[in-house]
Image (cartoon, rainbow, N blue to C red):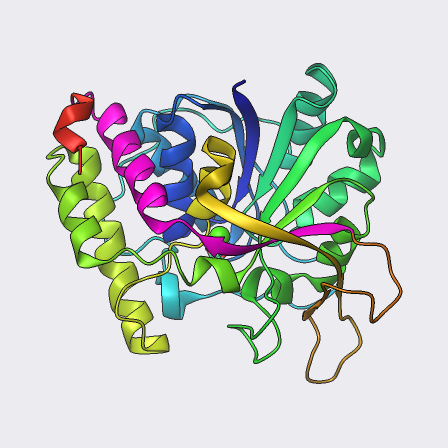
Amino acid sequence: MTERLILDCDPGHDDALAMILAAGDPRVELLAVTTCAGNQTLEKVTRNALAVCAVAGIDVPVAAGARGPLVRPQLVAPEIHGESGLDGPVLPPAVRALDPRHAVDLIIDVVLAEEPGTVTLVPTGPLTNIALAMRKEPRIVDRVKRVVLMGGSYTRGNKTPAAEFNIAADPEAAQAVFAGGWPVTMVGLDLTHQATADPDVVARIAAVGSPLSEFVVDVLGFFGRTYREQQGFDAPPVHDLCCVAHLCDPAVFTTRDAFVAVELTGTWTAGMTVTDFGDLLGQPHNTDVAVALDKPRLWDMTVQAIAALSAVPAEAAAR
Ligand code: RIB
Ligand code: CA
């Protein structure tokens, strides 16, 4: 059964790899890409999404969405992603024109056009577009198969000690998504910090020997430098990739069910994904929380996808 998805993203180095896996793995079908302000401004992340489509040969509708969060001032992350939002590689010009619809309308149109229960939403940036789509067209909540989001943490944050960036950027939108009543999988930092692009992985990608693989190596090179300088990582955690990998092969990580809610009023804890794996809060569990990664499985499929999009024989990308 091919998993079919809409990727709502803020490219973003790890968003770029999520796009590439979604396009290159035969087990999933990328229906559309939508963008929201997050790692950088809407204009920059949208240009970056179109550039990734150009370099990877991705030919799906791309629509721009929210310029900023529902309530709070906008956050961006140049310290990690650079001024362009995708510093490092040379970004090719767009090949495909931007879809004229707003991202929210594209999401609604696709979900209503497809059979109920067949489309998964994969947000890998702030959840503003998803929250707006739920409010504009409540029918999508019952039609969407699942929301598999990169965001949150049941331990520590990375934007504040309590909050992960995607949630911290728009806590109100995130709370609407977690409380929406639809199936949600939270792929938080506890999982994604296991997904580091170590030197052996980068070498396997480089060995594919195509313009796309060179692009990915440059993406990981910049991402690795900023993660080392800013957060002391030996290798960059490719957060967003994990969401798409789970659709390709659910065995890529394990999950535990929990109640998750987003703190909105804490002075120091706003944007925290409060996670109750038990019954401390007496709330029904509303989220599957990703906990343990099968790292070789993640990188095997990613290298294969890069090779597939590079039109390189699969054996050339074997371990
Ligand atoms: O905290 C990491 C998340 O924030 C990733 O999705 C990254 O791309 C940024 O959006
Ligand atoms: Ca992202």
Tell whether 11 sits left or right of 146. left
Q: Residue 209, percent across and down?
A: 10, 35
Instruction: Give the quarter of the figure containing the N terminus.
Output: top right
- Residue shown at 66% from the left, 68% from the top: 73
Residue 274 in the figure: left or right of residue 293: right
The range drawn in magenta is 286-312
Residue reaching furthest right? 282
Q: Where is residue 296 in the image (x, y as percent from the top left)?
A: 31, 46
Q: Residue at x 62, y 77 (%)?
A: 162
Instruction: Classify residue 201 as left or right of residue 238.
Output: left
Q: Does the magenta stretch include residue 8?
A: no
- Residue 65: x %, y % from top left: 61, 41
Q: Quadrant of residue 285?
A: bottom right
> Image quarter for residue 70?
bottom right
Residue 166 percent across, percent down from the top left: 58, 59
* 75 relative to 266, above or below: above
Res. 39 visible in picture: no
Work out whether 144 lies above or below 242.
Answer: above
Observer-nearest residue: 273 or 216?
Answer: 273
The residue drawn where x is 21% and y is 50% is 201
- Can you see residue 216? yes
Given residues 313 and 253, the one toward you in this image is 253
Q: In which quarter of the image is residue 306?
A: top left
The total of numbered circles placed on residues is 0
Location of residue 191 with respect to 162 vertically, above or below:
above
The quadrant the C terminus occupies is top left
Going 44% across and 25% down the picture, which residue do you hit? 97
